[in-house]
Image (tube, rainbow, N blue to C red):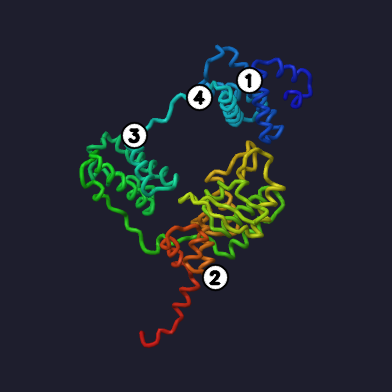
Amino acid sequence: MFETLFKYPNVLRRHKEGPLAAERAAYLSEQAAQGMAQGTILRRSSYCLCVAIELQRWPPNRCYNEDEVEALAAAWAEKRFNCGRASSPRWPKEHFRFVATDFLKSLGRLCLTSTPEKSHYEAEIDQFIASQQASRWQSKATCRSARWQITRFLDYLDHRGVVLVDITPIDVDAFFEHMSQRWGRSSLRTSAKILRSWFGYCESRGWVRFGLSEAILLPRIYRHEGLPLGPTWDAVGRMLIKTNGDDSASIRDHAIILLLSVYGLRSGEVRRLHLGDIDWPNDRIRFVRSKSKRKDVTPLEPRVGNAIARYLRYSRPKTESRVVFLTLRAPYRPLSTGGLYGVVARHLSKIGLPKKGRGPHGLRHTCARHLLESGRSFKEVGDHLGHRSPDATRFYAKVDLVSLRKVALNDLGGLI
């Protein structure tokens, strides 16, 4: 590995004869296999050599904690700054700390100074989540959200010295009053519904006083407050025109936006899409629904198929990952929730749309409205979106402006 990086004999000899040469070469080879640029690997090789020299001063099995990595990075950055190699120690320190942490982790010699504290009621929360999964919660995202909401509430009360068995409605009201400074009514309502279910379960097990769940009041949500938001179908068309470029980012983003807008997919359904989910010979594509985990097979729309094929041929990195959409920079990995949100929000902002409804779910609303305005039935739209209940699809009728306008213009005759 070192022979491909260094040309000068002295530099090559320093890296080959330095401590942990085999481990450093293996680490750098792994980064190169992930598609990392050679300039980045060169910088990492210097960081790794410095870390290896420091490790040589200690016993072979000694682990470094975060504070020690921080001190090592600060010393290295200060040295770079003093010799004129950097205008300030800030960024050398940040870069060195990142690489040192990653390298030590690959060696198995990184230990965390502290581990996140678990809730005192972790076992009780596990039982509650398991009971809900067995009855009505099929989505892992729903379970994660519920666990987060309950843990946040219990941590808040723990800081106030209140234990589970002594919780009163006054404590619950104090929590929501505290959170109302940052949360809107919809978020407060979501939290209240989860806590109501949690306390109902606790009451059945005798962990809290009876009647606590009924004492939780849900914030009022106004009838039109939660209407689906998102760009118009014409705005999506303008966005697709702007992403129809030849650079890697545009090719990837164009395919993602087409999938979201044409099929009305959720974020996770795009992020989890695998190469094996696309049946090219039969022009079919399979989606794993985020909530029901049901596998839906649907025809592959030609424009979407062409966009995905173009991405796979010209833009997708060469990697062993079977996930379709990956990051643009090494180390290549599947897009995160925030990464996919950023893809959509970045392009929607370019056409001057408001911030609300700018994420991937906004395009799902756009797709639903477009189908309804085109004359599709609730059943057809629900099947297209993967809904299990017609009530979920009826929600979009509130923003079917074309149909509502026809009702408003009808001659009501003698009724007026």
Q: Amino acid at mark 4?
A: Glu
Q: Position of residue 9 (x, y in %)?
A: 78, 19
Does 101 appear above or below 275?
A: above
- How many numbered marks, from 0 up? 4
- C-alpha distance separating marks 1 and 2: 64 Å
Circle 4 Cα neighbour tier, 10 Å, few/some/many (<14 / 14–19 / ≥20): some
- Which residue in the protein does label 2 denote? 374
Residue holding disc 4: 66
Residue 87: quarter of image: top right
**Quadrant of the image occupied by residue 233:** bottom right
Q: CA distance from mark 3 to mark 2?
A: 51 Å
Q: Amino acid at mark 3?
A: Ala
Q: Residues within 10 Å of mark 3 (few under 14, many from 20)?
A: few
The residue to which callout 1 is attached is: 50
Residue holding disc 3: 123
Residue occupying the far bottom of the picture: 414
Three-letter code for the amino acid on which mark 1 is drawn: Cys
